[in-house]
Image (cartoon, grey):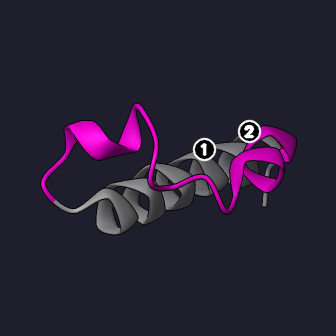
Amino acid sequence: MEQFRAIDGYIDSAPWTYAGDPLQRYVEVRDYCAVQVREAAGA
């Protein structure tokens, strides 16, 4: 999750711009990763 904090604000650059809606793609990937981290931690 630290990586997402570091790149937050750079949504208008690659790889997010490869999607039709860069903001939506970023949020989808970030949220997916957050769920994976929580599940791995047993939350």
Please state which of residues 34 and 18 is positioned toward the viewer in this rendering.
18
Residue at x 79% of width, y 50% of height: 42
Q: Residue furthest front?
A: 12
Q: Is residue 41 left or right of residue 27?
A: right
Residue at x 44% of width, y 55% of height: 26
| Dot label at residue 11 | none
Residue at x 61% of width, y 52% of height: 10
Quick one: quadrant of the C terminus?
Answer: bottom right
Q: Is residue 34 left or right of residue 30?
A: right
Between the residue at mark 1 and the residue at mark 2, the CA separation in whole angstroms equals: 6 Å
Please state which of residues 15 and 31 is positioned toward the viewer in this rendering.
15
Residue at x 66% of width, y 62% of height: 9
Please state which of residues 4 and 15 is positioned toward the viewer in this rendering.
15
Which segment did they paint magenta? Answer: 1-20
Q: How many marks?
A: 2
Residue at the spot of label 1: 36
- Tag 1 and tag 2, C-beta contact below 8 Å: yes
Q: Amino acid at mark 1?
A: Gln
Q: Is residue 18 left or right of residue 4?
A: left
Q: Is residue 18 left or right of residue 38?
A: left
Query: SS for tag 1?
Result: helix
Residue at the spot of label 2: 40
Q: Quadrant of residue 41?
A: top right
Query: SS for tag 2?
Result: helix
x and y percentages locating residue 23 in the rendered image: 38, 66
x and y percentages locating residue 3 in the rendered image: 78, 39
Q: Amino acid at mark 2?
A: Ala
